[in-house]
Amino acid sequence: MLRLPKFQVAQPRNVDDAVAILAEHGDRARIVAGGTDLVPNMKHELFTPDVVVSLARINDLSGVCEADGGALLIGAMTTIDAVAKHELVAERAPALAQAASLIAGPQLRRMGTLGGNVMLDTRCQWYNQTYFWRQALGFCLKKDGTECHVVAGGKKCVAAASNDTAPALMSLGASLVFAGPDGRREITVDDLWHNDGIWNKKVGADELLTEVRIPRQAPGHRGAYGKLRDRGSIDFPLLGLAVRLDLDDAGAVADADLVAVALQARPARVRGIAELLQGTRPGEPAFDEAVELTAAAAYKQCRPLDNVPGDSDYRREMVPVYARQTLRAAVEGTGPVHHL
Ligand SMILES: Cc1cc2nc3c(=O)[nH]c(=O)nc-3n(C[C@H](O)[C@H](O)[C@H](O)COP(=O)(O)OP(=O)(O)OC[C@H]3O[C@@H](n4cnc5c(N)ncnc54)[C@H](O)[C@@H]3O)c2cc1C
Ligand code: SF4
């Protein structure tokens, strides 16, 4: 049985107190929201904080509401289950609702939060293991070691961003509000990431995510999420793809976006797909051709590594399959796309 190392729990009642505790303890402190990722990682001795700062008693971090102008505001402590089931989210941001609905299993979705998902640590099959297992392997760059087992001779960790909501939020142009020692700041989800698997975020571990903001989408907005995983009941993504299609009044594609996760340290946008799809109309041959070109572009640009489980060649062959099906699901409103 894996045991938790010893640590203290701080339970602040407001964001300012939480930020002060984080500042006081520096890198010896760690935020916990639902704990569905942090606790297993602590049992694996990937993190051994002295102080765990729980957000559970801060009341105003939960819930979904609509701001003036129609943006959706989602508190960081809103559970994944609530995000998946919320009518406004399903209607305004279908890719996010669908991505949330495919995270882990029901119990984990009820404990896990949107904030914890955005701030999830990167994952790797050589890293998300017990201390004993990692020690037998000689550890690795991300924790306690000096080499990478994915890229021979590699000097940079390529553990994979594996958070399903991240590509959905990027496709929606969402932004994040953080509270930290220097006050509050808002950054776009696009700008959150570094391509470094050791810490793939541009914010510090002493900054607390308070809110996710999703701007009002175009009137003809369509979205969907597609996810490849081993077991449909619980697993992390082997590949995740979020699609946004904005249709104009005539039903033609005015804009489009496709963002992938579980490939590299940061979620990655497939470049150039708006140009391929713009002006085509679903149901007409030009749209079908553009979908095929988009799937081919995704195949060219998305190169899975042996960082997460699953054969990387197989995962790559699945990229165009999921790109095609997720685009069609967005148009037809039949998402999410998953097969197991
Ligand atoms: C068996 C299993 C299957 C899973 N499957 C999936 C899956 O398919 N897809 C997926 O995306 N995830 C999956 N997860 C991971 C996890 O359950 C979810 O990502 C969940 O949303 C994490 O939220 P949490 O509130 O539990 O985060 P926590 O575990 O509490 O925290 C996760 C990380 O985020 C930080 N953090 C949390 N909240 C904040 C905040 N407000 N501000 C700043 N930092 C914060 C913590 O310090 C920690 O580093 C799985 C986990 C397990 C155990
Ligand atoms: S990619 Fe995996 S094996 Fe390589 S350094 Fe990162 S966690 Fe370790």
Image: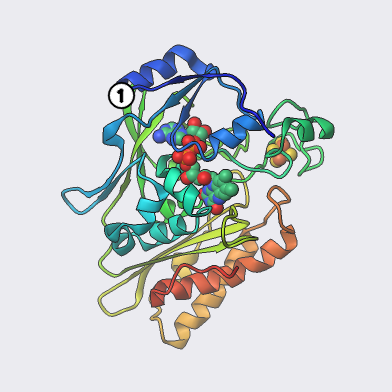
Q: Tag count in the figure?
A: 1
In the orientation shown, which residue stands out farthest toward the left?
68
Q: Residue furthest front?
A: 1
Q: Is residue 266 visible?
A: no
Question: Which residue is located at x 16 percent, y 49 percent?
Answer: 68
Percent x, y of residue 224: 43, 66
Q: Is residue 16 above or below residue 150?
A: above
Q: Is residue 34 left or right of residue 184?
A: right
Outermost residue on the top side: it is 24
Quadrant where ligand 2 appears? top right
Foreground of the two, 166 or 272 = 166
Answer yes or no: disc 1 within 8 Å of ligand 1. Answer: no
Query: What percent of the width, then of the height, locates residue 216?
Result: 26, 56
Residue 12, given in percent of the width and then of the height, sits at: 35, 22
Residue that appears at 36% across and 52% down: 83
Residue 133, x across and y down, in percent: 78, 35
User: In terms of depth relative to the viewer, which is nearer, 71 or 114?
Assistant: 114
Q: Residue at x 73, y 50 (%)?
A: 306
Position of the C terminus, as image quadrant, is bottom right
Q: Nearer the viewer, residue 19 or 272?
A: 19
Mark 1 nearby-residue class (10 Å; few <14, some 14–19, many ≥20): some
Q: Which residue is mark 1?
A: 13
Residue located 64% across and 67% down the image:
318
